[in-house]
Amino acid sequence: MGRIIAVANQKGGVGKTTTTVNLSACLAQAGKKVLVVDADPQGNTTSGLGIDKNNLTKTTYTLLMGGSYMHETEVATSVEGLSLIPANIELVGAEIELPSRDGREFILKKLLRNCNNLYDFVLIDCPPSLSILTINAMVAANTVLVPIQCEYYALEGLSQLLRTIELIRADLNKSLEIEGVVFTMFDSRANLSAQVVDEVKRHMGDNVYKSIIPRNVRLAEAPSYGLPITLYDSRSKGAECYMLLAQEVIEKEDLY
């Protein structure tokens, strides 16, 4: 049975899209069948996986609005075993149009209900806000993976997200769980990074991944080439850390 993971943080610039792109690629390279749903109107996950987001006719927007089916919206990527439902700026329209629809919070869940038989993992890249798109992702998901940048306001963003998850669990998806927190942009030379890690671990306990993603030049360069880090520079520290994270995620597979 496949696992649907919403990659979410209401705070922007925390490495959410970087984590979606590279974790999904590492899961696929570990032999898993993976689908990524780009639910962010910025479409950075789409371009980060090498798809031209400005030249698409079938996207997450057309899928949500009933203008396309899953099988015709899905596109292949450069990573074997990794497929994508792409997005572009048109997805902003869904934030305007979906609120007037009946059952608006459950549309993505209904679309993904057959994916458990087709994929080992479905990763949904959420926008950095509590929008109808984020709500759809969390209602559809089994778990929420939370990237946290190792900086001063990290805990503030985390507490807001945890409140959102509690609200979703109470009203819309009672089985929603925390997949785990993953630290991103860790700078081993900065005392603040270590302090943030220690503080979050005190709050989250076992819901923190051991793998920590460092600040890494090659990770920053890879999106401009439309490649995940494992294809751009498989020997980089960033690639090594995302492969370790993928193994941790896979090890949780039996729990779901």
Image (tube, grey):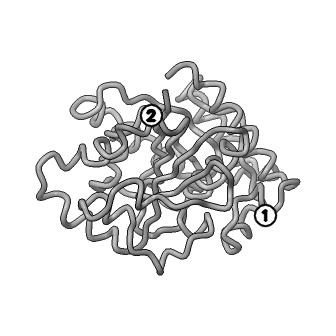
Q: Residue furthest front?
A: 72
Taking the image as shown, residue 174 lies to the left or right of residue 8, namely left
Foreground residue among 220 and 21? 21
Residue at the spot x=71%, y=48% of the render?
213
Taking the image as shown, residue 147 lies to the left or right of residue 42, namely right
Neighbor class of circle 1 (other Cα within 10 Å; few <14, some 14-19, many 20+) is some
Circle on res. 232: 1
Residue at the spot x=52%, y=48% of the render?
35
Tell me the kind of residue under disc 1: Tyr
Tell me the kind of residue under disc 2: Asn
How many numbered discs, if any?
A: 2
Location of residue 138 with respect to 126 vertically, above or below:
above
Q: What SS does tag 2 mark?
A: helix
Mark in the foreground, 2 or 1: 2
Residue at the spot x=29%, y=36% of the render?
168
Taking the image as shown, residue 58 lies to the left or right of residue 174, namely right
Foreground residue among 122 and 71? 71
Circle on res. 183: none
Residue at the spot x=54%, y=76% of the render?
52
Residue 211: percent from left, percent from top: 72, 37
> Where is residue 253, by image quadrant?
top right
Residue 1: percent from left, percent from top: 49, 26
> Where is residue 41, by image quadrant?
bottom left
Q: Which residue carries the number 2 mark?
A: 116
